[in-house]
Image (tube, rainbow, N blue to C red):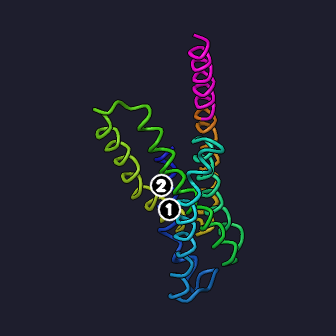
Amino acid sequence: MVAVMASCWSAFFSVLVLYAVAPGPLGLQEFQYGLLLTALAAGSVAGSLLVSPLQRLFGRGILLGLDIIGTFAMLFVPGVWANVWLVSAAMFLAGMGGTTWVVAVNSIRQRVVPNELLGRVYSAYRLISWGTLPIGAFIAGIVAEVAGLQAVFIGGAILNLFLVFPLINVLREEKRQTESGRSNSSTNLVQ
């Protein structure tokens, strides 16, 4: 999941400036492009403030889903609409989702990986996530040259839709573990 997500984020940001700054479809000036990026940062701050209550309410799997939704929106919206307000809102949502993803993945990793392996597992995770960034940018450049900027965005959005399938497995596993934990704790109470 992280390889797809990182590649799509990289693809998005590698062509965003061409899309946003004039003569691109959004027609922004250079300083306005900086303001557009602020929407993502504001979403990240909002996500950091809301991640704990969201995790308590909905669980870690839903936090992963929030990032899939946010990333889908960030990619899909500029692929369909050249509206700076809609693109900003989608980037805000992606910023929120990105923060919730980090917290959810780290808490899952810390729960399931033995302490003595955490460093190695985290390094492998980083290798995959950071290692796919140039791949996403490379593919985005080719797609943008051949089919246009909107094709990069729509292609990435479609690719993100496929992340729903592994997410369903994560949600099932989380539900199974929650139910197993409840039955164990009720058994312990009876004893």
Give yes or no for residue 182 being in the magenta stretch. yes
> Residue 71 falls in which quadrant of the image?
bottom right
186 and 68: which is toward the camera: 186
Q: Position of residue 79 (x, y in %)?
A: 66, 66
> Residue 182 falls in which quadrant of the image?
top right
Give yes or no for residue 132 being in the magenta stretch. no
The answer for how far apart the CA atoms under marks 1 and 2 are is 6 Å
Q: Secondary structure at mark 1?
A: helix
Q: Is residue 17 above or below residue 108?
A: below
Q: Is residue 184 above or below residue 119?
A: above
93 and 9: which is toward the camera: 93
Name the residue carrying label 2. 7
> Which range is magenta?
171-191
Q: Is residue 109 above or below residue 146?
A: above
Q: Are marks 1 and 2 in contact (CB under 8 Å)?
A: yes
At 57% from the left and 10% from the top, the residue drawn is 191
At 53% from the left and 77% from the top, the residue drawn is 18
At 41% from the left and 50% from the top, the residue drawn is 129
Q: Position of residue 133 (x, y in %)?
A: 41, 57
Q: Main secondary structure of the magenta part?
A: helix
Name the residue carrying label 1. 11
